[in-house]
């Protein structure tokens, strides 16, 4: 089993987190329809999020927040800033 090193920086993108890592959303960057939709689905500053799994080639990723699972593309997850 491959071990992932936990990032040491306090502010990261959601895609920087290894599987199983929990973090708190600090910002959703951008003003596109995608970022607006993510915020409508509960991805807002202050919410806790955990990376559940990633597809074999890394896209999409599944995250868990507010009691439900959400799958998103990596470029969408790049717009979500988190802190550990």
Image (spheres, rainbow, N blue to C red):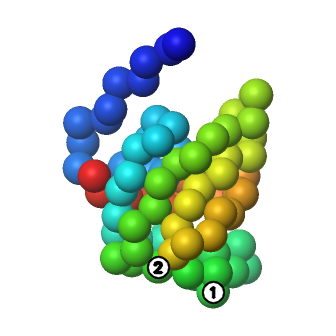
- The residue that appears at 71% across and 57% down in the rendered structure is 72
Residue 69, quarter of the rendered image: bottom right
Give x and y (percent) for residue 30.
Answer: 55, 72
Residue 58, quarter of the rendered image: top right
Give x and y (percent) for residue 26.
Answer: 35, 69
- Secondary element under disc 1, as helix, strand or loop, is helix
Instruction: Find the residue positioned furthest to the bottom.
Output: 40
Q: How crowded is mark 1: few (under 14 residues within 10 Å), some or many (20 or more)?
A: few
- The residue that appears at 24% across and 42% down in the rendered structure is 9
* Residue 54 position (above or below residue 81): above
Determine if residue 42 is in view: yes
Left/right of residue 61 with respect to residue 13 in the rendered view: right
* Residue 5 position (above or below residue 11): above
Give x and y (percent) for residue 42.
Answer: 56, 81
* Residue 62 position (above or below residue 26): above
Q: Residue 40 carries which label?
A: 1
Left/right of residue 55 with respect to residue 81 in the rendered view: right
Q: Are the residues at dot 1 and dot 2 in contact (C-beta closer than 8 Å)? A: no
Give the camera-side residue of 52 and 9: 52
Determine if residue 74 is in view: no
**Which residue carries the number 2 mark?**
44
């Amino acid at each position: 089993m491959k071990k992932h090193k936990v990032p040491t920086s306090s502010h990261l993108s959601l895609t920087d987190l290894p599987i199983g890592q929990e973090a708190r959303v600090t910002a959703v960057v951008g003003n596109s329809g995608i970022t607006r939709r993510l915020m409508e689905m509960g991805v807002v500053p202050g919410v806790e999020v955990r990376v559940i799994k990633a597809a074999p080639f890394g896209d999409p990723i599944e995250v868990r927040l507010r009691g439900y699972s959400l799958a998103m593309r990596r470029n969408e997850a790049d717009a979500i800033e988190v802190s550990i």
